[in-house]
Image (spheres, rainbow, N blue to C red):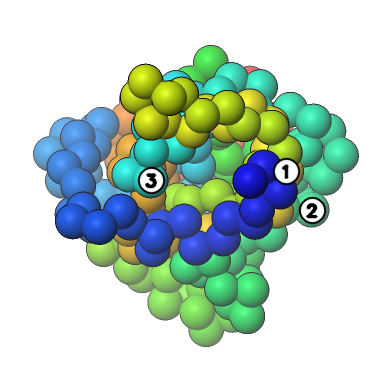
Amino acid sequence: MPNALHFGRSASLPAGRSTRAPVQKSGGAGAAPRIDAEGYFDGYASLFGVADLGRDVVMPGAFRASLAQRTAIGVKQLWQHDPRNPVGEWLEIAEDQRGLRVLGRLDLELPKARELHRLITRGSVDGLSIGFKAESEKRDLETGLRRLEKLDLWEISIVSFPLLPQARIAPRGDGRGPLGSGAHAAAFSRRRMAQF
């Protein structure tokens, strides 16, 4: 079913799977996600070649065509995949060798975004999850994995429990340095994305 829409992937766990999958966060045990006072943050929304809890594996290059058409500003930033809860914008979205790297900003004029800023700062929320339409996929009959080769990316959500447990806002102390202030957003985003 390559044309099925996939939203709310963080909530669609296979039967018997816990939402509390063990995750090794970089930056030290229990490191809080990194977000600055103006709401800028970065992280990975998807990792290539890693099976999520729904047994999907995103392949390298899967987002290339979609990002060429839609660009970062056309990909919505939502809370928990809810289209009634936009919380900010994506400034940069790019594929690198590891996966789908993102740089975003919460719109702190929105009450939900201010609440999320507090939760992210405390480390209570740090998950990222993609909403997409699969345009090309292959089922691996031996492993049962679905290999996603081409995706139409519609949105990336901040979530409590990502279906891909490693899809997270970058933690403090990950070696990439502090975010700084929002006045430098364009230069900052180019510099950060160049580091990926």
From the viewer's perspective, tell me whether residue 164 is left or right of residue 1. Answer: left
Q: Which residue is mark 3?
A: 54
Instruction: Name the residue type under label 2.
Output: Gly
Instruction: Name the residue type under label 1.
Output: Asp
Q: Does residue 176 sit above or below 4 in this rendering?
A: above
Of label 1 and label 3, which has the lower sequence position? 3
Could you give the CA–CA distance between mark 3 and mark 2, rounded to whole angstroms? 26 Å
From the viewer's perspective, tell me whether residue 17 is left or right of residue 34. Answer: left
Asked if residue 121 can be seen in this view, the reply is no
Q: Name which residue lies at 62% across and 31% down.
A: 137
Q: Where is residue 31? Give x, y as percent.
A: 21, 44
Residues 39 and 10: in front is 10
Of label 1 and label 2, which has the lower sequence position? 2
| Mark 3 nearby-residue class (10 Å; few <14, some 14–19, many ≥20) | some
Assess whether mark 2 and mark 3 are in contact (beta carbons under 8 angstroms): no
Residue with the most extreme bottom position: 111
Q: Where is residue 109? Give x, y as percent.
A: 61, 78
* Camera-nearest label, 1 or 3: 3
Q: Does residue 136 sit above or below 30 in this rendering?
A: above
Could you give the CA–CA distance between mark 1 and mark 2, rounded to whole angstroms? 12 Å
Q: Name which residue lies at 25% across and 31% down.
A: 26
* Camera-nearest label, 1 or 2: 1
Q: Using the image, tell me which numbered label, if any, was put on residue 114.
A: none
| Mark 1 nearby-residue class (10 Å; few <14, some 14–19, many ≥20) | many
Q: Name which residue lies at 26% across and 63% down.
A: 124
| Mark 2 nearby-residue class (10 Å; few <14, some 14–19, many ≥20) | some
Q: Does residue 137 sit above or below 42 in this rendering?
A: above
Q: Which residue is mark 1?
A: 152
Q: Which residue is mark 2?
A: 74
Residues 183 and 167: in front is 167
Give the SS element for disc 1: strand
Residues 103 and 186: in front is 103
